[in-house]
Structure formats: structure tokens, C-alpha cells
Image (tube, grey):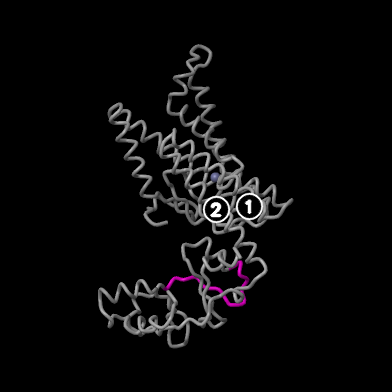
Amino acid sequence: MPWSFKLFEIAGTQVRAHLTFFVLLAVLGTWSYSQGGIDAAVERVVFVILLFGCVVLHEFGHAFAALRCGVRTPDITILPIGGLARLESMPEKPGEEAVVAIAGPIVNLIIAILLGAYLYLSFDMQTAVDFESVVASLPGQLLLANIALVVFNLVPAFPMDGGRLLRAFLTSQIGYVRATQIAATLGQGLAIAFAVLAIFAGPLLFLVAVFVFLAAANEKQAAAIRAFAARRTVRDVMITNLEPLSLDSNVGDALQLLSRSTQDIVPVLDHDQQLCGFVSRRDLERAFKRDGPARPISDMVEADIPSVASDAELKQAVDLLQNSEKHIVAITDRSRRFQGYIALQHVARLAAL
Ligand SMILES: [Zn+2]
């Protein structure tokens, strides 16, 4: 994700924080400082950092459960509205998806139980039943926050973990696509309710509403694409007859080629007709303005495009597109000669038809 920074890495999973998370810390710290001085500011920032620590543990719950089903999690990103674990793919079997989904809330439940035990032992409940000071203490607040995380995540609607549980449960009865549509529509309904509540509760809830709505819509689309891809091969939908460029062309050659075509990207081939990568129309136009037509394209080629064979199942290409940050997959034959490409937006359009 752009504007995110690596914090550390555990068992092949990078933990990253988005820039906006630091903005959140700064805003909360400054606000608390203005209300109650430096002590209040430190207390607030420490609480938020510990809270997001619990969120990261929640995401690791998903990641380790997924690993048991053979699915890796390359990264977990901390955003102001929560954590986002990027799994390489979702486990296929509904039972496995349910296990991966429930593993996150179970982590928060365990944290809550441990904090409860700690509070029970450290406050002498027999003599001082001062419930308010227990709740106001840092472990008390974390306990409540973890219970809230369990409850919120178990709401049976996408993109919450409860939505995955609901889909896993419904899939055996009405099929994957219908089950996804129901869980995602519930999520979008909930998002609209959040947006209305945000009028009273403030802008952070509105942000959550927007995120929930878009993520639910995304799930619907992803399920439709998966159903579409199930019975097709890459060859059925790939975009062919693109005019290629050779690696020793310059920006002027490239723009001349593009002036008589509507394609937005150009495959760049070496002398053996093997794919080196792609250049985009936008990058070429920018380079033309800055450096003129003689600039070679060789240093502009986006080379790390994933590729699959033309007889591969479409599902393989879709998995690559949905779980990597690349927007296209190149299609090559057995000797890596360029055949065409697939973009997620094209597949999405076909799936919607
Ligand atoms: Zn979760």
C-alpha cells in the first residue's frame, strides 16, 4: 500500500503502518495535551499504540490460521480505522475460511480474558469494589476495547470477520456467489446506518462507514469475478494484438506507435520476442515533455509484471491480480514469448455482464 512504512517482520509477514496512522497519533496526542497536559497526552498515545498492538495480534490470528491452510500473508497494514491483513488468497473451502475468520476475534477474546484475570488479581475485589477506577485504568480500558473488537468483528456482514463466517455458513446452502451477495449487502446496509449515525457521532464513524461500504462492494465484485473465472482459461479473455516495442526503442518511436492505436500500455520485447515488461502511455507522454523524443525507453520499463501461461486457468491470473498490487498479468507461451495480457477491470466488466 502506498504511504505505508515497514515496522517489523514476523514469520514472513511484514507489519506496516500507514502514514495516516501517525497523523491519528499526532492529532489525538495534541488534543489530549490541550485538554489535560502532557500526562494526558502520553496516556492517550500509549493507549492507542497498545490498542493497535491488539489489532495487529488480531490480524496475526488470521495470518497464522491461514498459514495452517497453506496461505501466506505477505503484509499487515495498520490504518487509523484498524488493521488490514493481505492474504495471498482466501482458502477455498468454506470450513477453512470460517477458521481463518474466527481466529482474529479469538485472539482479542484471549487478550480480554488475560486482562480480566490480571485486573482480578491486582485489584483486591473483596475490600475495594471500586469498579470505576478499574475501568478507568489502562488495562481496564484495553479490556473494554478488546471486548468491543470481538463484538464489532463478529457482526455478520462484510467486511467484518462475521461476514466471512456468515458466507462460509451460507455457501453450503445457496452457493458462494449468493452467499457473498447477502453478506455484502448486509455490510452495505450497516455502512449506511453508520453514515447516518456519524451525523451525531463525528467524522471518524463516517470514515468507517465509507470503508465498510467500499469493502463490501469489493467483496461482491471479487465473488462475481471468481465465479466467472471458474470455468474459463486465460486464453478466453486475454487482450491480444497489441503492438509491441523493442527494448532499444526511444520515447519518440513509442509515441508514434501509440498515435495510431488506442492501447494505453505497450509491451516491450527483447530480440527473442520475450517480454521484458510494459511502458504506459502516461509515462511516455511525461518523459516526452521532460526529456524529449530521444530518451530510450529501456529504463522506463515496468519489469516486475507477473505472468502466466496462455493455457492456464483464468482463476490463476485472477488470484495474482486480486492479491498483488499489480493491475495487469502478462500472458506468455511456454518459451516466454508474449501473447497478451489481462487486467482486472476487463475481467470485472466481463463478469458483470
Ligand atoms: Zn479480523
Q: Is residue 262 above or below residue 47?
A: below
Determine the residue positioned at 49% across, 38% down. Answer: 196
**Residue linked to disc 1:** 180
Q: Quadrant of residue 41?
A: top left
Depth order, front residue of 167/107: 167
* Horizontal relation, residue 93 to residue 9: left or right: right
Closer to the camera, 308 or 265?
Answer: 265
Measured Cα–Cα span from mark 2 to mark 1: 10 Å
**283 above or below 208?**
below
Which corner quadrant of the image does residue 290 belong to? bottom left
Q: Is residue 329 left or right of residue 295?
A: right
Q: Around disc 2, counting alpha carbons within 10 Å, would you say few (fewer than 14), some (14 to 19), or many (20 or more)?
A: some
Kindly identify the residue that appears in the image at 59 percent across and 40 percent down: 155
Whether the magenta-drawn stretch holds residue 37 is answered as no
| Quarter of the C terminus within the rendering | bottom right
Where's residue 320, x and y in %? 54, 65
Where residue 135 appears, as percent x and y from the top left, is 47, 23
- Tell me the SS state at disc 1: helix
For label 2, the residue is 217
Spot occupied by residue 124 in the image (x, y as percentages of width and height): 50, 16
What amino acid is labelled 2 in the image?
Ala
- Quarter holding the N terminus is bottom left
Res 153 label = none
Looking at the rendered structure, the secondary structure element under dot 2 is helix
- Total count of labels: 2
Q: Which residues are magenta?
A: 303-316
For marks 2 and 1 on the same chain, the one whose residue lies earlier in the sequence: 1
Check disc 1: other Cα within 10 Å, few if <14, some if 14-19, many if 20+: many
| Residue in the picture at 46% in, 62% down | 325
Q: Is residue 43 above or below residue 280?
A: above
Residue 172 lies, in percent from the top left, at 73, 52
